[in-house]
Amino acid sequence: DAKTTQPNSMESNEEEPVHLPCNHSTISGTDYIHWYRQLPSQGPEYVIHGLTSNVNNRMASLAIAEDRKSSTLILHRATLRDAAVYYCILRAPFRGSQGNLIFGKGTKLSVKP
Amino acid sequence: NAGVMQNPRHLVRRRGQEARLRCSPMKGHSHVYWYRQLPEEGLKFMVYLQKENIIDESGMPKERFSAEFPKEGPSILRIQQVVRGDSAAYFCASSPAGGNGYTFGSGTRLTVV
């Protein structure tokens, strides 16, 4: 799986939008872009994933650059409960023995009241 | 609809004892993954199993660690003769066949004293 680059940390104010960037310049044409987050003392939690088109769900939006070399996770209104480490992960289509997700260091998001 | 269940939540072992960590995947999920997270570090993949088969154990330490996912019952991660360096949070994830949609458990926090 190709490598991703994320800022180590970001800060946001409560109820403001947050844009979490991820660079993945070596992404292949079939890699999916997945985002997970890990709240303190909990296991990772799936947030969203996409391939080429922008995606929305109840948790967040994922904006994917036209060349797919970068993407941005958008939290529309940050709450204190969104404080977590956010991981951007590239995932090739599932093939037999290659099942695991490879986590990097992620971005630690702090939300100020 | 229970998620991935891990137990115990906390486990304390003395050096040299054995630790057994259990993971019950989500209903309908046939793939199980184990990850380890050392304090202040990211998640590291350990092993990927399907029922009665180890698919990828490239992240498992060569000695003292073993994993199984029997036909009936939970997946077990077993650590023999624990040492202080084994102190970590161990997370289990499950996914359906096809590999997308990982769900993580809340983890087992192992402390070796």
Image (cartoon, coloured by chain):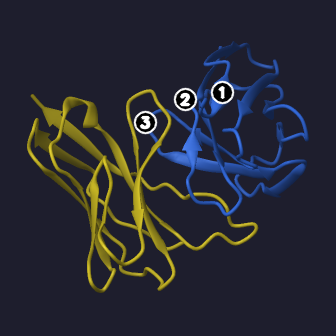
Chain colours: A yellow, B blue
Which part of the image, by quadrant, shows the N terminus of chain A? Answer: bottom right
Residue at which label 3 appears: B40
Circle 2 marks a residue in which chain? Answer: B
Category of crowding for the residue at label 3, using alpha-carbon neighbours closer than 10 angstroms: few (below 14), some (14–19), many (at least 20):
few
Where disc 3 sits, the SS reads: loop
| Residue B83 image point, x, y percent | 72, 26
Mark 1 to mark 2: distance in Å?
A: 7 Å
Mark 1 to mark 3: distance in Å?
A: 21 Å
Q: Is the residue at mark 3 from the same chain as the one at mark 2?
A: yes
| Residue B54 image point, x, y percent | 84, 53
Q: Earlier in the sequence, mark 1 or mark 2?
A: 1
Mark 3 to mark 2: distance in Å?
A: 17 Å
Category of crowding for the residue at label 1, using alpha-carbon neighbours closer than 10 angstroms: few (below 14), some (14–19), many (at least 20):
many
- Residue for point 77% across, 23% down: B19
Where disc 1 sits, the SS reads: strand
Residue at which label 2 appears: B106
> What type is the residue that disc 1 sits on?
Gln
| Residue A113 image point, x, y percent | 9, 28
Asked if residue A21 is positioned above or below residue A29 in the image, the reply reads above
Residue at which label 1 appears: B6
Q: Is the residue at mark 1 from the same chain as the one at mark 2?
A: yes
Q: Earlier in the sequence, mark 3 or mark 2?
A: 3
- Residue for point 65% across, 28% down: B5
Q: Mark 1 touching mark 2, by CB under 8 A?
A: yes
Asked if residue B82 is positioned above or below residue A10 in the image, the reply reads above
Horizontally, residue B105 falls left or right of residue B73, namely: left
Asked whether B88 or A24 is in front, the reply is: A24
